Amino acid sequence: MSTIGPEIERLIQLLSKLPGFGPRSARRAALELLKKREALLQPLAGALRDAAAAIKTCETCGNLDTTTPCALCRDERRDARLLCVVEDVADLWALERAGVFRGRYHVLGGALSALDGITPERLNVSALLARAGEADEVILAMNATVEGQTTAHYLLDALAASGVKVTRLAHGVPVGGELDYLDEGTLSAAFKARRAL
Ligand SMILES: [Zn+2]
């Protein structure tokens, strides 16, 4: 027996599909929206409608923006000879927040996974191989997960023919991290990646 109307039921259903949302947090979020109809629900509905109408996937790099090519691809101040490959737009955002990279990006749209049936054909790989010819360096900024590292190895092989320099992010001790708290895998990666001072 449901005491909730179908519109609210649908709202909860859709919210529960968001990452980090379970049925309980979806109900709480829906209730908050319904209580704050003018301050929250209506502006959110407008923002969702605008985003749905305006957002495009960049045909060059796979980023999300209101234009294609995206603002990052059109920015002449960014070094087109440096190409940073990331799994997801969230990773691109993280690197932009850090402000450490002034080149161009390439978003794969995921990582290889035999378990989930994610093959190279399902990722934005062929476009990367085409772009790599114009780059001096391709930086593989994959996640330090099994899937991320499998993807990095695959790309390293795939890029070998182009002769471009390929680098990857270092794995190791996080800033502010204490050795005693690190897992063996991280500690071993940090040890192997040690460098002269
Ligand atoms: Zn782009």
Image (spheres, rainbow, N blue to C red):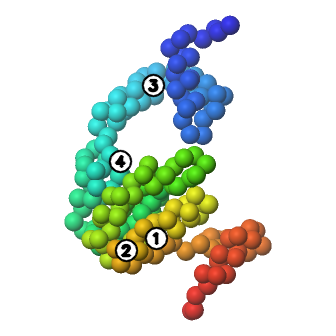
Q: Earlier in the sequence, mark 2 or mark 3?
A: 3
Residue 41, label in figure: 3
- The CA span between labels 3 and 1 is 49 Å
Please give the label number shown on residue 161.
2
Amino acid bearing label 3: Leu
Which quadrant is the C terminus positioned in?
bottom right
Q: Give percent across and percent down for residue 73.
A: 27, 59
Which residue, as the protein is rendered here, is positioned at the far right?
A: 180
Q: Nearer the viewer, residue 117 or 9?
A: 117
Label 2 crowd bin: few (<14), some (14–19), many (20+), radius 10 Å: few
Could you tell me how far apart the alpha carbons at marks 2 and 4 are, in whole angstroms?
29 Å
Is ligand 1 less than 8 Å from the beta carbon at label 2? no
The answer, for residue 97, to whether it is visible in the render is no
The tag on residue 47 is: none
Between discs 1 and 4, the one toward the N terminus: 4
Position of 186 with respect to 91 (left or right) is right
Dots 2, 3 in contact, CB < 8 A: no
- Across and down, in percent, residue 33 comes to 51, 25
For the residues marked 1 and 4, what is the alpha-carbon distance in whole angstroms? 28 Å
Kind of residue at badge 1:
Asp
Q: Which residue is mark 1?
A: 157
Amino acid type for the residue under numbered disc 2: Ala
Compared with residue 88, is residue 15 higher up or lower down, i.e. above or below?
above
In the picture shown, does residue 47 fall above or below 129?
above
Q: Secondary structure at mark 2?
A: loop
Residue denoted by label 4: 64
Q: Quadrant of residue 134?
A: bottom left
Q: Is ligand 1 less than 8 Å from the beta carbon at label 3? A: no
Q: Mark 2 or mark 4: which comes first in sequence?
A: 4
Mark nearer the viewer, 1 or 4: 1
